[in-house]
Image (cartoon, rainbow, N blue to C red):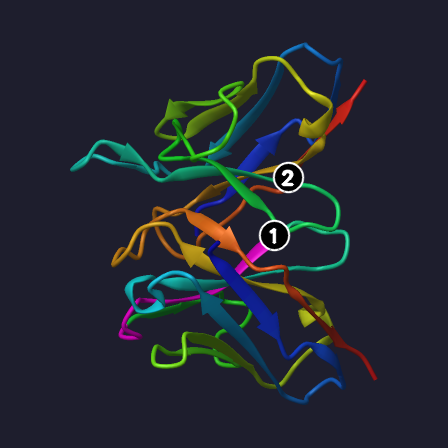
Amino acid sequence: QVQLVESGGGVVQPGRSLRLSCVASRFTFSNYGMHWVRQAPGKGLEWVAFISYDGSTKYYADSVKGRFTISRDNSKNTLYLQMNSLRPEDTAVYYCVKGSQSGDDYVSFNIWGQGTLVTVSS
Amino acid sequence: DIVMTQSPDSLAVSLGERATINCKSSQNVLYTSNNKNYLAWYHQKPGQPPKLLIYWATTRESGVPDRFSGSGSGTDFTLTISSLQAEDAAVYYCQQYYSPPYTFGQGTKLEIK
């Protein structure tokens, strides 16, 4: 069964950094665009960032642009989110999400990880 | 950015009855060159990640029961659950993937009456 497993969440002080990882299994990771989506406690879904299958294209939400960096290592089947200058409003569960069709940037999100909680607090 | 607005924010429906959730986009999400609406529906149960139900506005994801259906085009879309089951209680989200940022609606909480 296709699987995405996130890690790296935790409690961090405002202004500090954190790196999230997502390990993919049971599909050809290098063929698919990947996303990060977050959900603040008790709130709705907010798309955060996208990276194309080969890493050549990246998009970011305005709320994280300049602070977060999405990357991938296709040799390790792993997606990353480097989060710098963290703010209390970045507190959320962060989901790693797979695009539904290979090689296409504009597709629905068909596989979601269980998420990892990031709490930004002093 | 494309703003997605769902209605209602919440609804309560009896078992076996029909549930309807609406979603309106601030811009057209129909790509005329392939005649596809870049619109998806998800639901999320407590403590779980979201699950894809419908994509291209009307195509049911594999394994999704046929009581779920999507309709609409351009800027106005609807998710219909034809005969509500207890396991359908969840928060439902629409999402556009026409252009980044890939925005979601605010969510509609569906409860069993």
Q: Amino acid at mark 2?
A: Gly
Q: Kindly indicate the quadrant of the structure image that contains residue B108.
A: top right
- Please say whether residue B26 is visible from this viewpoint: no
Q: Is residue A85 left or right of residue B53?
A: right
Letter of the chain that mark 2 sits on in the rendering: B
The part of the chain drawn in magenta is: A46-56
**Spot occupied by residue B82 in the image (x, y as percentages of width and height):** 57, 13
Q: Is residue B102 left or right of residue A87?
A: left
Return the residue found at the far top: B17
Give the label on residue B34, or none.
none
Q: Which mark is residue B107?
A: 2
Q: Which residue is mark 1?
A: A45
Specify the quadrant that holds the C terminus of chain B.
top right
Parent chain of label 1: A
Q: Are marks 1 and 2 in contact (CB under 8 Å)?
A: yes
- Amino acid identity at mark 1: Leu
CA gap, disc 1 and disc 2: 8 Å
